[in-house]
Image: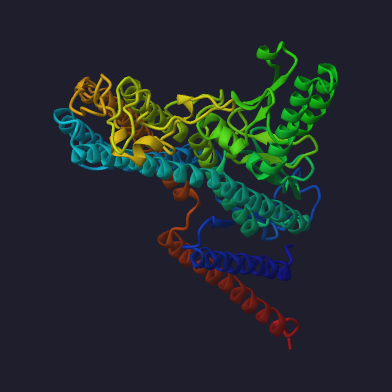
Amino acid sequence: MASTFGSLEIAKSGLSVAMANLKLTGHNIANANTVGYTRQRLITSAIEPTEGRYLLSQVTADKTGRGVAIIDTQQIRNLYLDNQYRDLNMDYNYSEYRTNALTYLEGLFNSELKEGQGITGSLESFYQSLKDFANNTTSEEYRTSVQQAAVSLTENFKVLYDEMIDLWDDQNYSIKTNADLINSTAEQIARLNGAIAEYERSGYTANDLRDQRNLLLDKLSGYVNMTYEISDVNKSMIDVKIGGVDLVVGTSFNKIEVTSPSSHKTEIDAITEQIADINAKILAGNITSLEGKDQIDELIADLSNYIDVKLTANPENGDFLYDVTFNGVALVYGSSSMEIEDAVEPNVIARSMYYRNYLTLDLDDGVDLCIENGTVTSGELYSHMEMVISDGSGKTSGEGIPYYIDRLNELARLIAQTINDIHATGYTYPTDGQSSVTGVDFFNVPLDINGNRDYSRITAGNFRLSDSIFESVWNIAGSSDEISEDNTFSGNSRIAERLRDSFSDGKYYGSLNSLVSTLAISLKTSKSICETKHSLLDSIDTQRMSISGVSIDEEATNLIVYQQSYNACSRVINALDEMLDILIRNTGIVGR
């Protein structure tokens, strides 16, 4: 015969489970708007009879179960959708931040294409001033107009160049910001790993702590491409990798270190100056080439701690001297050296490689996180890296800011060299006792490491008039013949006409329009991809939330169900109470 008091325990277990369900439902409702919260439910199981052989014996009244027990509190999550969401989140964040950068860049160039504004307006003004000058090369007013139009042109180039450099700096700084955010997130995940493992030693699941960890994984997937898996050491923990490199392992994490060669300018310049001095000693015969090479090798080893350089024998000195280059830019040539900031400025790749922020996971071997080695392939971090240095081969492509800076520099060089080549063949106008001379540059041409004029060192940032033209408008050449001091009307206007006609083929405008068209196509493609990724991400998130999110209506229905269950168990206890009351009161009184 089944125990009467055992029936009370069955009803009591039902009350406990119903109350626990009511409490958990209230917890779900309270966190309906909590970001990252996952709906929970109780996992229950029937309590088997105490008879050990009940599974093999005939079922009778005394071999029924003993009520219900709570096994665990379970999160309602779909791991497949979680993985899909995080994979898409990496791609979406890359596309979004790339689109934002290109949109800003397009805004800079759009102002340059408006009629009468920016570089386009300056080119038009310069052309108009040259037309007037060709009609009257003796007019001081027209000469001044040419000078000022050219100054305005160079200033507009510099303004756009500076804005693009500022954008590059912002993107480069964002690399460091992202590294800090990744470090902070990794530290929190490692700390939660420990807390979850400690809590779950009791046999229960740390659902709310797991919610926090899952939310951090969602955030991390927006920063960079990452993967995660259950730890082999403890199933309550997860390990996280970036590009196959360990970021979080159990309760420990590897910190990303941020470095930049530009922070070692003093050391780099000191070493290159020493190498140039050694070359000078070799050239003077104070030391042998072999002795100098040994000393230079030691210095190159030190220099390689800061930048990757190439050491080559100088062919102009019988291979006895040694040159040092950084990304194709000469830092040391024979006995001459150049400070690295001056050396890299005209070369957008070398400049980017020098100023950019490099990331290294703080491991024993030190693993670089970058586009070049394939460790960073997605997420916000990837977009910033791509904007800073266009591709992994060290070349500018249509992806990053250096490409557009390089194109703008090329336009400045084209204008400078075309105008200079024509202008240098003409003669200046004699005035104030000055003779008519030829060979004068209109635009300034910077000098290379050996002191030679080098058009490749012209950038949109240093594009300016030559000192001669800036100091006197009479140094502007208009005549192809020498002008006599005694007869200033003896010249002609052929050079002025050639300067004017240099605009006739539209190559300046064509170069600028081509640059902007390339940017527009790149931006359009990026926007399209971003919109597609956003749509897919929203779709996956909606599916995920339909499973994991809290529905107030559904939880309200559950409240009624669990309340009815509680009431029903209460009635069972009331019925048993009445039975026991009759049993106790009436036992032994029959026959009295």
Residue 449, placed above or below residue 425: below
> Residue at (53%, 72%) from the top-left corner?
567
* Residue 424 in which image quadrant: top left
Percent x, y of residue 312: 70, 17
The residue sitting at 64% across, 33% down in the picture is 243
Residue 81 visible to the viewer: no
Q: Where is residue 76 in the image (x, y as percent from the top left)?
A: 55, 50
64 is higher (above) or lower (below) than 500: below
- Residue 196 on image: x %, y %: 71, 55
The correct choice, above or below, for 417 with respect to 564 in the image is above
- Residue drawn at the location 74% of the way across and 66% of the way down: 3
Residue 362's x, y, as percent? 74, 42
Which one is in front, 280 or 374?
280
Residue positioned most to the front = 486
Residue at image coords 51%, 69%: 563
Which part of the image, by quadrant, shows the C terminus? Answer: bottom right
Residue 14 lies left or right of residue 34; in this view the side is right
Please indicate, yes or no, whether residue 336 appears anywhere in the rendered image.
yes
Q: Quadrant of residue 493?
A: top left
Looking at this view, is 513 or 187 the one in front?
Answer: 513
Q: In this view, does 5 lie to the left or right of 329?
A: right
